[in-house]
Each structure stands twice: as C-alpha cells, then as structure tokens.
Amino acid sequence: MSQDTSSVTVELVQTLTNSATSVDRLYYQYKNNAYSSKCYEEDEVYGEDTTQITIQCVHTSNVGVLEFWIADDLDKGILSEGDDAIIPQCCHPTVPDKTPATKYLIVIKCKTECPDTIE
C-alpha cells in the first residue's frame, strides 16, 4: 500500500476461500514500533476479507517483517495433517489441540530497490 524508510503499510487479503466461506483463525505478528512486536488474532476470516497493517522497519536492514499463521479445521480441506506450525504463546492462541496450522514469513523492503536500466 505504501512505504518509506521507517515503515511499510501492507494489506492482507484472505484468498484461501471464496467470500462465502472462512478460515477458522488468522494470527499475525509484526513490529508496531522499534521496541515491541504485537500479535493479533482474527476469527472466522472470510474470503476477500482484508486487514491493513503498518509495520515498523528494522533500521539495520531496512525491511519490515510480517509473520502470520492460518489455523483451520482439517475437514474444510484447506490445510493438511502435516500442517503443524506452532502459534506462539504471545499470540494467545485459542485453537483446539491438533488443529492444523501453517506459518508464513514475509520480508518486505521498506525502500524500493529497482535495478538500474541497461541501455
């Protein structure tokens, strides 16, 4: 959505299902300032639902880091038995034991780095 040298704003869009169905839980964690991270939980996230997040950039590497986890009932067919990611306790997960979960880690550049044009 936007970026500068101190933060980057992104939009998460739930694309695993259509707008009539949902995933049970979405957890996402990022630096909200230079000294702390926050983790959030969203229940029943329907297809095409969006969440905007402003992530504080890491000054030494000029990137923003977003971690997110999807937890969903196995019967829905989105996740598999082998999806056994562990949602951190700081996220206060409320998923039942043995619920499949998967984790994604995204590193976002806070400053666009386009290659030089070769003529």
Image (cartoon, grey):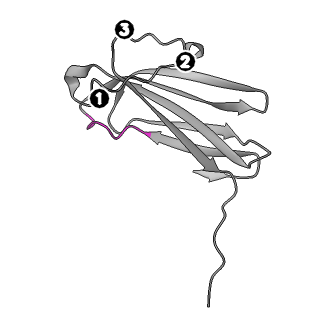
For residue 57, what is the image quadrant?
top right
Q: In the image, is residue 112 above or below residue 60?
A: below
Amino acid type, residue under disc 2 in the picture: Pro
Identify residue for label 1. 79
Q: Is residue 6 left or right of residue 108?
A: right
Q: Residue furthest bottom?
A: 119
On the image, the x and y values in percent for residue 118 come to 62, 86
Span colored in magenta: 13-19
For residue 43, what is the image quadrant?
top left
On the image, the x and y values in percent for residue 35 come to 79, 27
Residue at position x 25%, y 21% in the image:
74
On the image, the x and y values in percent for residue 2 come to 63, 52
Residue at position x 34%, y 41% in the image:
15
Identify residue for label 3. 97
Q: Is residue 57 left or right of residue 74?
A: right
Nearest to N terminus: mark 3 or mark 1: 1
Amino acid type, residue under disc 1 in the picture: Leu
- Judging from the image, what secondary structure is the residue with disc 3 in? loop
Identify residue for label 2. 88
Q: Is residue 105 left or right of residue 34?
A: left
Residue at position x 62%, y 91% in the image:
119
Nearest to N terminus: mark 2 or mark 1: 1
Contact (Cβ within 8 Å) of mark 2 with mark 3: no
Residue at position x 61%, y 48% in the image:
108
The crowd level at tag 2 (other Cα within 10 Å; few <14, some 14-19, many 20+) is few
The alpha-carbon separation of the residues under discs 2 and 1 comes to: 19 Å
* Dominant secondary structure (helix, strand or loop) of the stretch shown in magenta: loop
The alpha-carbon separation of the residues under discs 3 and 1 comes to: 15 Å
Q: Is residue 38 left or right of residue 73?
A: right
The crowd level at tag 1 (other Cα within 10 Å; few <14, some 14-19, many 20+) is many
